[in-house]
Image (cartoon, rainbow, N blue to C red):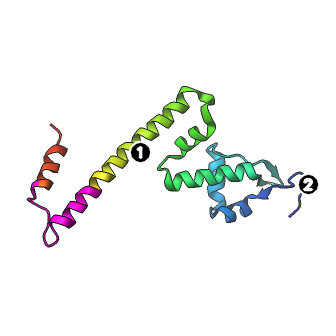
Amino acid sequence: MTVPGVQGLEPIDAVARRLGLRASAIRYYDERGLVAPASRHAGRRWYGPTEIRRLAIIQYWQAHGLMSLEEIKDVLDGPADGRRWSQVVRDRIDSLRAQAERIEATRAYLEHVLAHHPDSAPDGCDHFESLLSTARPG
């Protein structure tokens, strides 16, 4: 489709199809300040390569980065906000590190269950009981 003033840009519905998103999600990202269309013409949002790439990054981080939209926005906005940006990045790294440690501990425990309790529940297992005692507060 050729529309004056939007050459090289794609309408929101084409971008949505290309990325496997709903147009309503893209409009929501626009409302939240995560992405802005390169142009608006005849009531439609039009996106260029820069905006499409940003949408792909948002989509990726939502699916894989375990980040809120606010965190994604803060990271994508870059260090213009200085300390806030770096603090968001540091906090996210710390959170992901802690989550990875919990996942690793759970994986190790389940491997123990398979190796040592193939025919029974792990209740009463010394290893299981030691994990419970260290997990209890106080």
Residue, x 52% and y 31% (percent of image)? 86
Q: Amino acid at mark 2?
A: Pro
Q: Is residue 111 above or below residue 87?
A: below
* First to last magenta residue range: 107-126
Give the Cα separation between the discs numbered 2 and 1.
Answer: 46 Å
- Residue that carries the numbered disc 1 in the rendered image: 96
Q: Is residue 104 above or below residue 75?
A: below
Of the pair 132 and 25, the residue shown nearer to us: 132
Q: Dot 1: what SS?
A: helix
**Outermost residue, top direction?**
83
Q: Is residue 115 left or right of residue 26?
A: left
The quadrant the C terminus occupies is top left
Asked if disc 2 and disc 1 are in contact, CB closer than 8 Å, the reply is no
The percent position of residue 50, horizontal first and vertical second, equals 73, 48
- Residue that carries the numbered disc 2 in the rendered image: 4
The percent position of residue 2, horizontal first and vertical second, equals 89, 61
Residue, x 58% and y 55% (percent of image)? 59
Q: Is residue 118 left or right of residue 26?
A: left
**Outermost residue, bottom direction?**
119
User: Does the magenta-highlighted stretch encompass residue 109?
Assistant: yes
Residue, x 47% and y 35% (percent of image)? 90
